[in-house]
Image (spheres, rainbow, N blue to C red):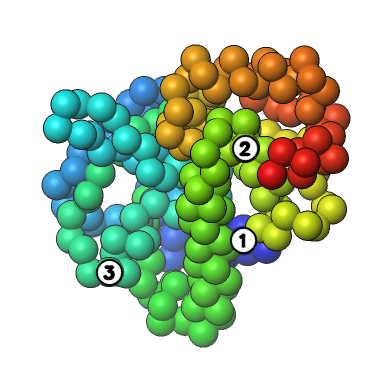
Amino acid sequence: MDQLKFIDYCLNHPLVTVNGQEKAYKKGTLLTTAGAEITKIGIVTKGVLKTCNYTRVGKELCSTIFDQGSVVLEYLHLMKKRYYTFDLIAVSPCTICWIPIKIFDEIALNNQQGLALYVEHLAHRGMETQRLVSCLGYKTIRERICYWIASSNNNLELNQKNIPKNIKLPGSQELFSALLHVTRASISQELNRMEAEGFFTRNRNVLSNVNDTKILATL
């Protein structure tokens, strides 16, 4: 995919080969907490992570997920923020290549080829942010699930007919429910009902035989 061009460029860059540090984390690991100093930028090479903040009564709020090919902390760094504004947690076993900030800047901002690829990468990430905002604009769980499916492949315009027949939901049901701001039990129940009604066939977090007619009719 085009959005991975920058990732491949970074990971294969001689400066990253010499200065990058790849670390593996177990599922459930708390990598860092809000307030910690940002010294490196991370590229996820395997697995899924999530950002967490908490309400005053301790309810967890997940605002972002980082899966394979994602860049961790780039926005905070570009905004000149020196400290994490969230907890970072491994949703599954994962591996991250940590790159010192000065090295990342040299590759992504001070190099013409790297900068061009990085702008393209940021555009794709902006599309994903818009996708989540649009998804949360729908009221019901079913509508949010349908929009998430329909908006795959940068497909934000719902009159397009290139809805994939097979789609992998992000991470686990727990993570997907957190993204859609609903409970895990409610999304599990709704996925079961939709499968029974012929919207798709489900095997854990993989949906196949997606019925685009039913998906679009819901929206």
Element marked by disc 1 = helix
Q: CA distance from mark 1 to mark 2?
A: 27 Å
- 157 horizontally vs 104: left or right: right
Residue 49 seen in the figure: no
Q: Residues within 10 Å of mark 2 (few under 14, many from 20)?
A: some
The quarter of the displayed image where residue 6 is located: bottom right
Q: Nearer the viewer, residue 146 or 170?
A: 146
- 125 horizontally vs 201: left or right: left
- 52 horizontally vs 64: left or right: left
* Residue beneath the point at 16% across and 46% down: 36
Q: Position of residue 120 (x, y in %)?
A: 58, 71
Q: Give amino acid for label 3.
A: Met
Q: Nearer the viewer, residue 12 or 118?
A: 118
Kindly identify which residue carries mark 2: 143
In what quadrant of the picture does the N terminus appear? bottom right
Q: Give amino acid for label 2.
A: Glu
Q: Tell me, yes or no, whether the two marked residues, 2 and 3, touch with CB atoms within 8 Å.
A: no
Q: Nearer the viewer, residue 82 or 112?
A: 82
Q: Nearer the viewer, mark 1 or mark 2?
A: 2
Q: Residues within 10 Å of mark 3 (few under 14, many from 20)?
A: few
Kindly identify which residue carries mark 1: 3
Residue 189 seen in the figure: yes
**Residue 56: which disc?**
none
Q: Position of residue 130 (x, y in %)?
A: 52, 58
Sequence-first disc among 3 and 1: 1
In the image, residue 216 above or below residue 145: below
Q: Nearer the viewer, residue 109 or 134?
A: 134
The quarter of the displayed image where residue 195 is located: top right
**Residue 79: which disc?**
3
Q: Give amino acid for label 1.
A: Gln
